[in-house]
Structures are given as structure tokens and as C-alpha cells.
Amino acid sequence: MKQDEYWNSVSEKKEFTTPFQAEAFSRFVKRDNRILDIGCGYGRTLDELYHNGYRNLIGLDFSSGMIERGKQQFPYLDLRVKENDTIALPDKSVDAVILFAVLTCIHTNKKQEQLLEEIKRVLKPEGILYVNDFLLNTDERNLSRYEKFKEVYGIYGIFELPEGAVCRHHDEAWIKQLLKDFSELEYSHLTFTTMNGHKSNGFYFIGKLDNV
Ligand SMILES: C[S@@+](CC[C@H](N)C(=O)[O-])C[C@H]1O[C@@H](n2cnc3c(N)ncnc32)[C@H](O)[C@@H]1O
């Protein structure tokens, strides 16, 4: 199944849950800063930002179903369909990027790196990146699916859900490598409840773009 088709098929049903650390975010991002939420889903994080006084907000998601739901639910938000692998915004045009539970949907190293390159292109110098995502787990259910799908995808931590999504739980060393051009401002381990109601290891990271 193509992954945008999967996300469209669940766009009316799923509730996303990874928490937004409002207090930490407000220490690094001002209320009038331009903030881009990539893979924004139906816009629940942008809505939380809106209610925290942020107004310069854009959301992008490759699922037109998610964007439609968001427009219905939060008509005051600027939500747009992301048409391809590029971000349709100029270089150095946003102060902060949010990436919540999106890496988990992009399973190859190469595609994740391409997205990070685009994020670095659109961020202003010393721009802020706030990521949260899933880390590897050690329970039996996860171990068996990591083993099973390692044969198929070549990376430990990638697995298919029965309904068609391909997901990834990350080795922490890979996350550090992926985010290497950002100076760490905050990094914490968290336990997330997944969109399917299970518990999973996760992290959040807030970093500042280095001059590279
Ligand atoms: C688990 S949901 C999280 C949504 C949102 N970030 C949140 O936390 O509420 C992942 C979202 O990423 C979107 N997505 C996955 N891969 C993407 C890609 N390559 N480009 C843009 N959006 C993507 C999906 O359509 C889905 O809405």
C-alpha cells in the first residue's frame, strides 16, 4: 500500500497523542515567530500553539484527507497538502519546524535525510527544530516484529502494521546522527501511547540549527 493512501484511509479515525511540551517550546520560540509543522496530520499541535498565542503557523501533510479534516475542525489554521518531497517554501523562511511522529512514517534512512535537508533549507540561521518520535522497545511483541521485518526492510525497528502502514522505531544512535547539524537544547526520553493504544519508548528533541 502507498503510505499516503494509508494515511488518507485513517484520516477520519486516528487521534495523535505524542505530547507537546509547551513550556520548553516557549523558551526558544517567540509568539510572532513563523512556525512550520511538517506532517501536521489534522493540525492538533498547531491548534494547541494557536491557543497558546502563536499566530504565524503553517501545517503541511502529504495526506489530503488529514488536511481536509483539519480544515473542518480548525478553520482558522493554514493547512496545506504537501505535494512532493520538497517543502514549497523559500530558503531561510521559517523560525521553527515541528516534526511530531513523522520520522516513524518514513522508514528509509535516505528519505529521512532528504527531509532533514529540506528542513535545514527552509529554516532561518539558528532556527529551531522540535522533533518527537519513537525509539526501539524491548517487549516481546515489538521484538518479534522487528526481527520479522528486518529481513524485508534491512533495518532493525521497521515493521508493518496489519492495516498497511510501514512504521519505524529508531535506534537512538541513528536519531543523533540524523540531527547532527542541530545543537541540542533539550533531549528527553518519554513513554508514548501510540495511535493504536500501545505504550512505546520515545523521545523529544529541541535543537538549534548550526552554521554548517
Ligand atoms: C502519526 S501522524 C502525526 C501527525 C501530527 N504530527 C501529530 O502529531 O498530530 C503522522 C503524519 O505524518 C504524515 N506523513 C507521513 N509521511 C509524510 C511525508 N513524507 N510527508 C508529509 N507528511 C507525511 C501522515 O499523513 C500523518 O498525518
Image (spheres, rainbow, N blue to C red):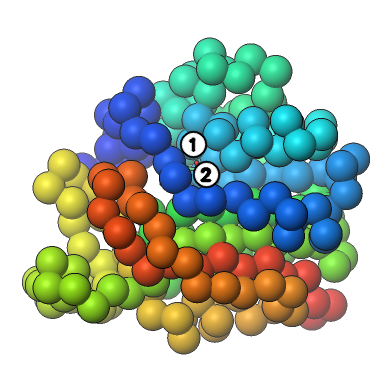
- Could you say where residue 49 lies in the image, as x and y percent from the top left? 71, 38
- What separation in Å lies between label 2 and label 1 (alpha carbons)? 6 Å
Marks 2 and 1: CB-CB under 8 Å? Answer: yes
Mark 1 residue's CB less than 8 Å from ligand 1 = yes
Camera sees residue 32:
yes
**Count of number-bearing discs:** 2
Asked whether, in this view, residue 40 is left or right of residue 191, the answer is right
Helix or strand or loop: what does disc 2 sit on? loop
Asked whether, in this view, residue 204 is left or right of residue 13, the answer is right
- Residue where numbered disc 1 is placed: 41
Residue at figure coordinates x 44%, y 45% from the top left: 17
- Could you say where residue 90 lies in the image, as x and y percent from the top left? 79, 46
Q: In this orientation, which residue lies closer to the viewer: 74 or 3?
A: 74
Q: Quadrant of residue 45?
A: top right
- Could you say where residue 180 lies in the image, as x and y percent from the top left? 64, 81
- Residue where numbered disc 2 is placed: 39
Quarter of the picture containing the N terminus is top left
Q: In this orientation, which residue lies closer to the viewer: 92 or 77?
A: 77
Asked whether, in this view, residue 205 is left or right of residue 134, the answer is right
- For disc 2, the neighbor class at 10 Å (few under 14, some 14 to 19, many from 20) is many
Residue at figure coordinates x 69%, y 26% from the top left: 78
Q: In this orientation, which residue lies closer to the viewer: 24 or 94?
A: 24
- Could you say where residue 73 lies in the image, as x and y percent from the top left? 54, 17
Residue at figure coordinates x 30%, y 59% from the top left: 199
Mark 2 residue's CB less than 8 Å from ligand 1 = yes
Quarter of the picture containing the C terminus is bottom right
